[in-house]
Amino acid sequence: MFQSDLLRSKRILITGGGTGLGKAAAGRFLELGAEVYICGRREEVLAATEQELRARTGGPIHWRRCDVRDAAAVEEMMGGIWADGALDVLVNNAAGNFLARTEDLSLGAFQSVIGIVLMGSLHTTLACGRRWLAAGRGGNVLSVTTTYTTTGSAYVVPSAVAKAGVQALMRSLAVEWGNRGIRMNAIAPGPIRTEGAFSRLLPRPELEQAAKERNPLGRFGTVEEFANLAAFLVSDGSGYINGEVVTMDGGEWLQGAGEFTAFGRQLSEKEWEMMKPKKRN
Ligand code: HXC
Ligand code: NAP
């Protein structure tokens, strides 16, 4: 769907790029000519992904161990990467999440998720942004949020709070830094099968089925669909898109929001027929 050199010479960091959606994006960016850095906390996961994607694409990929909650560690990672050359693109993809009743959560549980999602994205975005501004060059940040940033969601409150903050960060800086050539956007995906998300958020198989059935398209998204959208948004072809949140959820959240959607689906064929206007003689 893209020219094979769409991302040629782009240097891209994907946080949490060792697994799931971040890994899929890393593979796609490499296929399209980018040089890719991935980071995360687990060295063995990062090293295995680096090996697999290099073998598959032949592209330049590097990994760094970094906990994005730690501002000093992020600074050190960025310094190391910049020593080899400036990044062009940052993808804030690392996240933490779990299902829990909010009243049961410890302060540490909130701090963990908000630390990874909101503070992590803040640390990386500032580290890149300050370097781009100081050098008088442009840059591009893409954050992965969720569809519940505006609605909130029961049972994932630390994530909802943190992702809403990330969205506000993107939109605020899109305006503040836009005049200096720095773009900020987000993707809000609906459910896409990854081990990290589904093991924590859909603990029973019948919940997976229910999640599919409430989607207008009747299926989950795919990591390939996510990777293609990410490739477009980090490419120069999307250069006038700034401060945008692109939802890719098959229409799921709109289905949840529609006043008559659930109600209408419960009506029988006979009831629909009865509601049609009566023919006049
Ligand atoms: C309640 C929990 C908990 C749970 C951990 N905690 N799991 N509380 N219910 N299930 C609490 C702990 O008691 C602790 O609090 C604090 O959270 C930190 O836990 P640790 O295990 O020490 O943290 P850590 O090892 O850093 O792990 C972070 C994590 C973990 C977020 C808890 O799940 C993780 O590593 N996740 C990374 C990957 C991930 O979550 N991917 C899914 C993304 S999907 P105390 O007070 O005891 O210190 C997504 C969107 C999906 O985001 C949308 C789908 C449509
Ligand atoms: P995932 O595989 O669990 O990805 C999360 C990644 O973040 C992991 O590689 C993890 O690696 C890394 N990470 C976690 N804490 C970190 C930290 N403190 N520092 C650095 N890296 C850290 O889940 P995923 O489904 O691919 O999720 C990717 C993104 O998509 C997330 O932002 C998620 O919120 C979003 N999303 C996913 C879905 C979905 O259905 N899959 C839907 C909506 C939004 P380590 O554990 O090794 O650190």
Image (cartoon, rainbow, N blue to C red):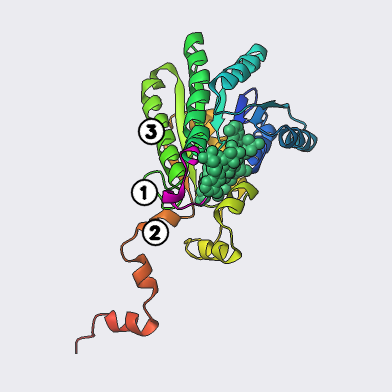
Task: Tell me the CA gap for discs 1 and 3.
Answer: 14 Å
Mark 1 Cα-neighbour bin, 10 Å: few <14, some 14–19, many ≥20 = few
Q: Quadrant of the C terminus?
A: bottom left
Of badges 2 and 1, nearer the viewer stands: 1
Place of residue 47 in the rendered image (x, y in percent of width and height, measured from the top left)? 75, 32
Kind of residue at badge 1: Thr
Give me the disc on residue 168. Answer: 3
Q: CA distance from mark 2 to mark 1?
A: 10 Å
Would the CB of label 2 be found within 8 Å of ligand 1? no
**x and y percent of residue 206 in the render?**
57, 67
Q: Secondary structure at mark 2?
A: helix
Check disc 1 and report the residue beneath it.
151
The residue closer to the viewer here, 92 or 99, is: 99
Q: Which mark is residue 256?
A: 2
Mark 3 CB in 8 Å range of ligand 2?
Answer: no
- Ligand 1 placement by image quarter: top right
- Using the rendered view, name the quadrant where residue 241 is placed: top left
Compared to residue 123, the image places residue 261 above or below, namely below
Q: Earlier in the sequence, mark 2 or mark 1?
A: 1
- Pointer 1 or 3: first along the chain: 1
Residue farthest to the bottom, as pictured: 281
Q: Is residue 271 a member of the stretch shown in magenta?
A: no
Q: Amino acid at mark 2?
A: Gly
Residue 176 vertical position relative to residue 145 in the rendered view, above or below: above
Give the quarter of the figure containing the N terminus.
top right
Q: Are marks 2 and 1 in contact (CB under 8 Å)?
A: yes
Asked whether, in this view, residue 277 is left or right of residue 37, the answer is left
The furthest residue to the top: 135
**Residue at point 39% right, 55% down?**
254
Q: What span is colored magenta in the figure?
A: 99-109
